[in-house]
Image: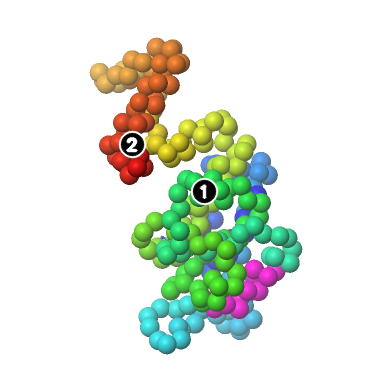
Amino acid sequence: MRIDIISVVPDLMRSPFEGSIMKRAQDAKLVEVHFHNLRDYTTNNYKQVDDYPYGGGAGMVLMIEPIDTCISELKAARDYDAVIYMTPDGEVLNQSKANQLSLMGNIIVLCGHYKGVDQRVRDLFVTHEISIGDYVLSGGELAAAVLCDSLIRLIPGVLGNETSALTDSFQDGLLAPPVYTRPADYNGHQVPEILTSGNTPKVEAWREEQALKITQSKRPDLLD
Ligand code: ADE
């Protein structure tokens, strides 16, 4: 998978890609991530990439020209399966959407900033609009990092144990059961006995039961 991220403040989002799973995936050549600073694509002497909205109103709007130049340059070099725009009015990201997007080859992720992008960018270039939740961030950068993390960890071979993404919360529509590690007794607080029994079918049955119980109590909407 190749991910090209377009932003006016790419430095804001580099660090999540420089550690842990996202770094490991890049080191293993399972994903390539490229950042593009929108200011590098403007012909404007002042490197201006935003302007006042027509019709008035608060905030600035990202201009179409540098975005068009950047996307066109990328598309001239290779084919893309999706141009994703991060926006609070997009489709809310969930595990099934992440599964679907993780199967793509090359994607462009466009981060909005200020009041967003000129509507013509959305009309002409964007194929998917994604929100990470019903709240407004200062820009799409952190949302893009969240989206990329959710996709990259699903690429086969990225997680050490192939099954670990499959047992994540939401993969089977349920929240994950609780987990414990050593010591089995911490100041009198015991690990559930079943987990130290060595009886794998019983452990599996316990985990399923716990997953259902936790989902019922914390997120009953998932069971509808
Ligand atoms: N940009 C600003 N807020 C956002 C959100 N909630 N999701 C995606 N992009 C955003």
Local SS, label 1: helix
The picture places residue 211, in percent across and down from the top left corner, at 37, 31
Image quarter (top left, top right, bottom left or bottom right) of the C terminus:
top left
Disc 2 marks a residue whose amino acid type is Thr
Q: Which mark is residue 215?
A: 2
**Secondary structure mostly seen in the magenta stretch:** helix
- Quadrant of residue 71 in the image? bottom right
Residue at figure coordinates x 45%, y 83% from the top left? 53
The picture places residue 149, in percent across and down from the top left corner, at 52, 48
The picture places residue 152, in percent across and down from the top left corner, at 57, 46
Q: Decide: marks 1, 2 in contact (CB < 8 A)? A: no
Residue marked by disc 1:
98
Of 224 and 127, the residue lying toward us: 224
- Disc 1 crowd rating (10 Å Cα; few below 14, some 14-19, many 20+) is some
Q: How many marks?
A: 2
- Whether residue 122 is in magenta: the answer is no
The picture places residue 185, in percent across and down from the top left corner, at 31, 17
Q: Is residue 207 left or right of residue 123?
A: left
Disc 1 marks a residue whose amino acid type is Ala
Q: Is residue 154 visible?
A: yes
Instruction: Note whether 22 is above or below 143 in the view shown.
Output: above
Residue at figure coordinates x 40%, y 34% from the top left? 176
Instruction: Note whether 222 is above or below 179 in the view shown.
Output: below
Way the structure is coloured = rainbow
Q: Which residues are magenta?
A: 62-73
Residue at figure coordinates x 51%, y 34% from the top left? 166
- Disc 2 crowd rating (10 Å Cα; few below 14, some 14-19, many 20+) is many
Local SS, label 2: helix
The first of marks 1 and 2 along the sequence is 1
